[in-house]
Image (spheres, helix red, strand yellow):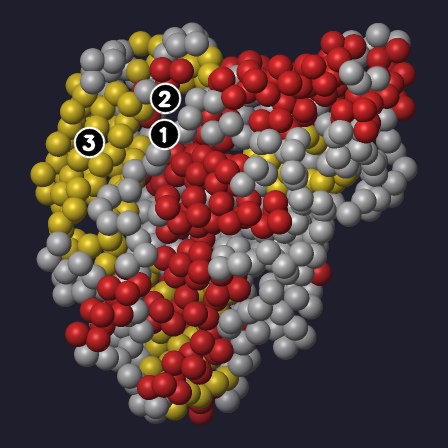
Amino acid sequence: MTLAAFALLTAAVLAWAEPACKVPRAAPTGTAAWTAAHSSAAAAVARMSQQDKINMVTGIGWDKGPCVGNTAAISSINYPQLCLQDGPLGIRFGTGTTAFTPGIQAASTWDVELIRQRGEYLGAEARGCGVHVLLGPVAGALGKIPHGGRNWEGFGVDPYLAGIAMAETTEGIQSAGVQACAKHYIANEQELNRETMSSNVDDRTMHELYLWPFADAVHSNVASVMCSYNKLNGSWACESDKAQNGLLKKELGFQGYIVSDWNAQHTTNGAANNGMDMTMPGSDFNGRNVLWGPQLNTAVNNNQVSRARLDDMAKRILAAWYLLGQNSGYPSINIRANVQGNHKENVRAVARDGIVLLKNDGILPLKKPAKLALVGSAAVVNPQGMNACADKGCNTGALGMGWGSGSVNYPYFVAPYDALRVRAQSDGTTLGLHNSDSTSGVANVVSGADAAIVVITADSGEGYITVEGNVGDRQNLEPWHNGNQLVQAVAAANKNTIVVVHSVGPIILETILATPGVRAVVWAGLPSQENGNALVDVLYGLVSPSGKLVYTIAKKAEDYGTAVARGDDNFREGLYVDYRHFDNAKIEPRFEFGFGLSYTNFTYSALQTTTTATITPGPAGGPTIPGGPSDLWDTVATVTATITNTGAVAGAEVAQLYLSLPPSAPPSPPRQLRGFAKLKLEPGASGTATFKLRRRDLSYWDTGRQQWVVPSGVFGVSVGASSRDVRLEGSLQV
Ligand SMILES: *[C@@H]1O[C@H](CO)[C@@H](O)[C@H](O)[C@H]1NC(C)=O
Ligand SMILES: *[C@@H]1O[C@H](CO)[C@@H](O)[C@H](O)[C@H]1NC(C)=O
């Protein structure tokens, strides 16, 4: 392609985007809206019988209604049969719905506009299907264990980035009048023994890592929170007074309701008296064991659970319903409605802009090759059919998402081969295909081609399905299906090898990077239904790759310092998770958190820091609004930097700000992400990255005072292209 044609195409692709910098928007505080919703709810509760209230808080049983969770209608107050449906990337079991990109891919774009739009479209589809409560977004698992089976459902391992994504997604979903559900609360970091193990997390780590993104969701007025399967300090999460009443309802001022994960309730009174508000699905999966319903009625009559507590549960559920305006004109339930609209455009944009270029010696972008070869079972759609495996419980054919309840049906699926074939035809390129992972015969297909593209994968999911020996969590961080050997066989026969990785999380790339002939590594993540289109957009330079890693890729698995726990997990690593650990322990990663290459180059200049008068040391102390003390959310400093595209093509840069706390703070990770901005820049153009620092961004959790405290002294400010590629350094005096 000529440069002029390239520029035209790039301009067309960029046209939809807003120019200049993007900073996370401030959420509305929502206090007034909740107050109004709670007063409507109180009036309705006054008209309800005790049985009505019991019905409102108890699911009607597994597999008894149109949705994965259902409660009975309450005619006296015109309350409908409530529909709760998985999940975080679309409408589970839908047949006319979009398979949105997983959370991990959305986070990899670092693009708040795309993340927001994804949330809005998720909400629009849920509403179109009459779903009242969409069971997402996910901030737990956060992903402290790289093997963790469900990490891909969330937004990566940094709480600040996950928090911004939780806020944008919650607000997006709820802008359509649909209740979002922040899950799984909390410290639900692995699948092994998830229903029996205890996560024992110290107070500071709980606040600064695991609670942090939930606080963002609460600040964005999330309607509901799902308590998780695991125990916390030996108490079931759905019976933890500390987690539910202490942290969520009191400290964060959460006004909505807590719903159990499916069958995560264990006792009638323990759940009721420790803060859980709704049980789902209302029985165990055999439809037998019922813990609320008639049992809760008896407990209330015997004063084991107070009438006030039952009223509070009903009031919280109703308040969420009123808050979202679901009391008027809500569509009736039809999970099979066709509600896709133009939403695939968001899928393609997120799939594409979440691609991270890890290595490129100049072979990319492709320029009308005469002959190309494509290799791997993941190059083509699953031969049994794109939705052949229930809940995506197989890794056969091209990979678009992990497996489990957080998966959905694909309405269509564009595999790498499908998209490359179209492009090859228009360029007059001969395209060879070896659609298996067997090394035998692969040399014949790839030798003589201008480039050979090998697609490899790694998959994981929820522990109720075992795939190729992986019981949810991954057994190791190696590519599946002997991916290393496949790459070696291809590169032995073709010295222009491009490796494409579709993966739920990090894999160890050392063997591949040491293989002569591997000229590029394209980390394509989990692109859902637009898998091939997104890949072709990047391989051919229709856009410059602009994703950045949302986790570290280590040189070896042991370097992470965390592993799936065989019994309880004492979270001994504390705050030192992912890059916080690599930085602190001075371990060289292969590719650090925040890393990603482009087809162009960016320079950073003119760091400026301005502070406001409210930047005082000491604890936050404002009145509690949703999310915690109000002043925690105030902007206290603004940092700006100029980013210039000095290369030859248009591109986008994710500028990242990391803070180092002053010595007066307790020992802390050397650098923590506290800001980012994605700038789309034409060649030669400059833009301003603006980072707004809130009081919470400068605070640590003081376990003695039980408050967020801004330490006094000099904060280190690092702005750069990754967590290690620091381009500008400054400071901030408090
Ligand atoms: C768990 O125990 C630790 C140590 O006593 C405590 O700091 C923390 O708040 C407890 N968390 C929960 C959820 O009970
Ligand atoms: C980017 O900079 C590197 C060196 O810093 C140089 O080798 C490369 O050619 C530049 N790329 C572009 C697209 O300008």
**Of pointers 3 and 2, the one earlier in the residue sequence:** 2
Tell me if residue 252 can be seen. Answer: no
As measured in the structure, the alpha-carbon distance from the residue carrying label 2 to the one carrying label 1 is: 8 Å
Percent x, y of residue 73:
80, 33
CB under 8 Å between callouts 3 and 1?
no
Q: Is residue 33 left or right of residue 715?
A: right
Q: Of the residues shown, which amino acid type is indicated by label 2?
A: Trp
* Image quadrant in which the C terminus is located: top left
Q: Secondary structure at mark 1?
A: loop
Tell me if residue 668 can be seen. Answer: yes
Q: Residue drawn 37% across and 12% down?
A: 620
Q: Of the residues shown, which amino acid type is indicated by label 1?
A: Ala
The residue indicated by pointer 2 is 633
CB under 8 Å between callouts 3 and 2?
no
User: Local crowd at mark 3 within 10 Å, few (<14), some, or many (≥20)?
Assistant: many
User: Local crowd at mark 1 within 10 Å, few (<14), some, or many (≥20)?
Assistant: some
The residue indicated by pointer 3 is 639
**Of pointers 3 and 1, the one earlier in the residue sequence:** 1
Q: Is residue 326 left or right of residue 530?
A: right
Q: Secondary structure at mark 2?
A: helix
As measured in the structure, the alpha-carbon distance from the residue carrying label 3 to the one carrying label 1 is: 16 Å
* Image quadrant in which the N terminus is located: bottom left
In the image, which is nearer the foreground, mark 3 or mark 1? 1
Percent x, y of residue 612:
20, 18
Q: Is residue 459 left or right of residue 368?
A: right
The residue indicated by pointer 1 is 26
Percent x, y of residue 652:
25, 54
As measured in the structure, the alpha-carbon distance from the residue carrying label 3 to the one carrying label 2 is: 16 Å
Q: Residue drawn 86% across and 21% down?
A: 51
Front residue of 36 and 86 = 36
Q: Secondary structure at mark 3?
A: strand
CB under 8 Å between callouts 2 and 1?
yes
